[in-house]
Image (cartoon, rainbow, N blue to C red):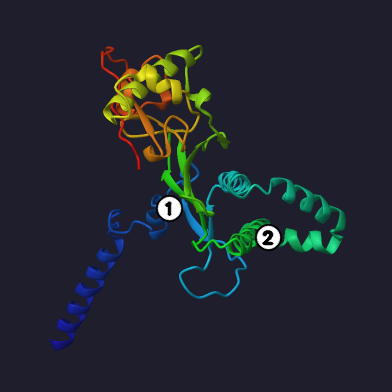
Amino acid sequence: MLNQKNTLALSILVVILGLTGCQKPDPKKTEPVEQTAASQVVDTSMLLQGDTEKLKLSLPECGGNSCPEFSVDRLHSNQPFVDEILDQAILKNLDHILDIAQLNKTKKEQDQNQSSASEIQENASKTPAQQMQDRVQPYVNSFLELQKELQNLGASGQMSLTISPKILNADLPLATVVLNSSSYLGGAHGSSAQTYFNFDLKTKQQVALDQIIQSNQKGKLTQLAHDAFKVWVIDSKLAENVAEYEQAWKFKLTDNFYLGKQGLILQYGEYDIGPYVVGLPRLTIPYDQLKGVLKPQYFPAEMQVDQPATSSVATHPKVKS
């Protein structure tokens, strides 16, 4: 009797195990891990991602408040063509600040004539940052020589020079990087600048102001910018009469721009459209004024549809000090 019960229990257990093995797995519970990971991969080819890296430059040891400061950062991003354009812009900026372009040209020609095959191969094996350090070091040397000359003349101020890029917009329609620079090389005051670089990540090209404007609309854009300039002059209390102001500081359209949240930003440098006291002026042209002027793809997404034109007055940009 006991053997019959054991046999029956064993038979039931075999049947249960068999049924369990035949059940179809729930696809929701058995989704492969590889598929989940793949679905999380993001295409970054249309994004500008990166950070700045400080160049390791050779400066003499110094202590005290009068020590010279020389600091240059470069951009290290996932878009090498952007990094190269910014590197060239940094060198051009240093040329402008220190005025040693001819010196560098002569030195470069000498270096090219004297470089051996092994030196060329060694340079090719260096990282972009190391190559940039080699190119910037002559500017450091010139900067230090200038400091010595000023000290011999009795100058006691702290000389300084800094250049650093920063990503402002990382994706479409234009990726934007601003290059900030400031310097004090003696004299009454220092100098600063902000230059914007706009890139089409699809074509891997830098984009100029003329390329974002509709055909034959440069004149209209100039008029809109001039209107914004007039408002800026009055709002900033620079003059009561714009015509009189323009006798000293005539308006001109800059090609230094970027696409802001509210509109097209036109960035000016020191002494471009006003005295040193106004700093780095900006003029903003709202997007609703740019219909028919700006190419459709450069408007914010919500404005890239047909909308009735609206009348509006020139913007009232703020002075950047």
User: Where's the C terminus, which quadrant?
Assistant: top left
Q: Are marks 2 and 1 in contact (CB under 8 Å)?
A: no
Q: Quadrant of residue 264?
A: top left
Inspect the image, locate mark 2, and give the three-letter code of the amino acid beneath it. Answer: Asp
In this picture, is 231 found above or below 236?
above
Mark closer to the observer (2, 1)? 2
User: Disc 2 to disc 1, how far (Cα)?
Assistant: 42 Å
Residue matched to label 1? 38
x, y (%) of residue 71?
53, 60
In this picture, is 46 found above or below 296?
below
Inspect the image, locate mark 1, and give the three-letter code of the amino acid beneath it. Answer: Ala
x, y (%) of residue 54?
53, 61
**Residue lying furthest bottom:** 2
The residue under the point 34% across, 56% down is 31
In this picture, is 230 found above or below 66?
above
The residue under the point 41% across, 27% down is 298
x, y (%) of residue 272?
47, 32
Question: Toward the viewer: 318 or 45?
Answer: 318
- In this view of the protein, can residue 290 be seen by the observer? no
The residue under the point 48% across, 53% down is 50
x, y (%) of residue 282?
38, 33
Element at label 1: helix
**Label 1 crowding class (10 Å Cα cut-off): few <14, some 14-19, many 20+?**
few
- In this view of the protein, can residue 108 be seen by the observer? yes
